[in-house]
Image (cartoon, rainbow, N blue to C red):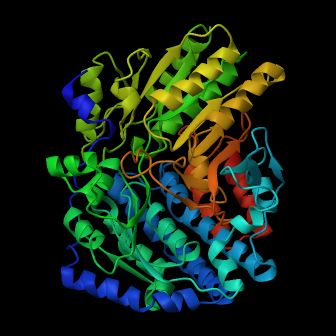
Amino acid sequence: MSAAAVEARGTVEIPQGKSTFPPTSTTQMDRAVAVVRDHKDAWVALSVRERIALLEKLRKDTFAVSERWVARACEAKGITRGTPTEGEEWLGGPFTTLRNLRLFEKSLREIEKSGRPKIAGKVKTVAGGQVVAEVAPVDQWDKLFYAGFSGEIWMEPGVTEQNLADNQAHIYRVKAAGGTIEGKVALVLGAGNVASIGPMDVLYKLFVEDQVCVLKMNPVNEYLGPFIAEAFQALVERGFLRIVYGGAAEGQYLCNHEDIDEIHITGSDKTHDAIVFGGGPDGARRKAAKKPLNTKRITSELGNVSPMIVVPGPWSASDREFQGANIASSLCNNAGFNCNATRMLITHAGWDQRRPLLEEVRKVLEATPRRRAYYPGAEDRWNLFVKEHPDAEQYGKARADGLPWTLVSDVDPSNPDDPCFQTEAFCGLFGETALEAGSVVEFIDRAVEFCNERMWGTLNASLLVHPASLKDPAVAEAVERAIANLRYGSVVINHWPALAYGFVSTTWGAFPGHDIYDIQSGVGVVHNSLFFDRPQKTVIRGPFRVFPKPPWFVTNRNTAEIGRKLAAFEADPSWLKVPGIVAATLKG
């Protein structure tokens, strides 16, 4: 393995994007921090009723800007308006943000009524003693639009069914009991890839952690800043939010600002380490000596080499076709610039349908047009992997500024240092490795151990398992054991883990246990619309096959219309909008 590949473990250090906005000056940044600091106590004192009114206004204003928001994102990413790919920007931008606003508002209404958010489903204790709360479907709308899907949040050990209520909506419980919450200022370092990340991180800091915010836009998508400012003008006008611009220098200035209390970052472990320890060899020495420069509380989501375990079973040709599109879509969405993109397929070496399934994946990759490689350093990251694997397969219709969809099959599972296991590619590339096992149960157990011990990161993982396989009690038990034992913040059955991001009622973040010296996928969670204080992981279960075709599939022909209609629905739910959504979905 090359020295460059060894150095790149984790997330590759990504070059700074080219700014199109003038960087915010230090004087302006000082003013922005001062404004929100001056209003932090006013925010903490805001009643639940006043917060509900704010969320109503934010929802209205976010939808009002959504069409222009999506148009600008498409322009920046080279997406032709009206094509299915436009739908990615609706689903990953306004739709998810609007859903977040609606579910936070729902929870606050329940807090106002009964003291805490209402858990939609059952609360149970599973084998091993962990408490599990069913949090999706949230309501009648979810039951219709996401039929067959369910979501759970598994709590950390120590939470019981009896004390669960005492581990929910902490700040609101304290205030209701007459206690006080200290106002704080949070710096949110926005992500450059998915449009809803920055605004949703801000919402979490405000409404769940009671912190006013300075949001620094990432240079890659700073063009969204004015749209977020307009959508969130109700927060800006009252001094609860400020938005600033710039690159690493501005970010470092704010991270070290004496009036910034906490930091939240969505990005890379390399950026996290630079904030905490400083850059270069001196930073590496400080990390090794456990002498951080920045000791502020930092929450983070920092990527993953996301595994997808394919459980062998009696798959039909149509099963393979559906799952081939499912697997390919989990890579191709957003041109592969997702921290939850599938990076490693884990298959059974002796499964007779392993090769036919990969052929279905190849067909979809070949038919899917290449995308603009808009994220800085994409070609260098791609070259790192292809240099290590010169036989990597390349697919997709060529374009001058696009990289090919790339599959590195038959990665040697005995080589722990292969970059496919240790490095997040963060482009349209993924790998496949086959494990030997004497039975399906043995394979599942081995695959879980492989993910936990060999793969870098703990953000999200998924399993594909045919319903016929689950009729075998031993296999069903092994799958449940896998769900319990996978050390990932989200575990999704039969689908792409981005659902754990998009459901919002679920949590999004790394598996607990990392510290600043081995940060991997980060610390803390966001979304979490039921305000659980001690969540461990999200588990989403979905049907093996779904009809109509899911809107996140790259083979869906009507994603743009579906995304637009779903955003309009989340802005103002109504039964009158349901027929249009159903009709649009059936056209996919």
With respect to residue 503, does 258 lie above or below? below
User: In this view of the protein, which residue sits in the foreground, 315 or 580?
Assistant: 315
Image coords of residue 106 (percent x, y): 72, 73
With respect to residue 327, does 164 lie above or below? below
**Residue at the outermost left position:** 281
With respect to residue 423, does 264 lie above or below? below
Query: Which image quadrant for residue 324?
Result: top right
Would residue 404 be visible to someone looking at this image?
Answer: yes
Would residue 396 be visible to someone looking at this image?
Answer: no
- Identify the residue shown where x is 41% and y is 28%: 421
Quadrant where the C terminus lies?
top right
479 with respect to 60 (left or right): right
User: In this view of the protein, which residue sits in the foreground, 122 or 227?
Assistant: 122
User: In this view of the protein, which residue sits in the foreground, 105 or 323?
Assistant: 105
- Identify the residue shown where x is 34% and y is 28%: 419
Image coords of residue 78 (percent x, y): 34, 51
Query: Which image quadrant for residue 550?
Result: top right
Image coords of residue 76 (percent x, y): 33, 58
331 with respect to 110 (left or right): left
Image coords of residue 372 (percent x, y): 32, 45
With respect to residue 253, does 178 lie above or below? below
Query: Which image quadrant for residue 407?
Result: top left
Total number of numbered labels? 0
Quadrant where the N terminus lies?
top left
- Identify the residue shown where x is 61% and y is 80%: 55
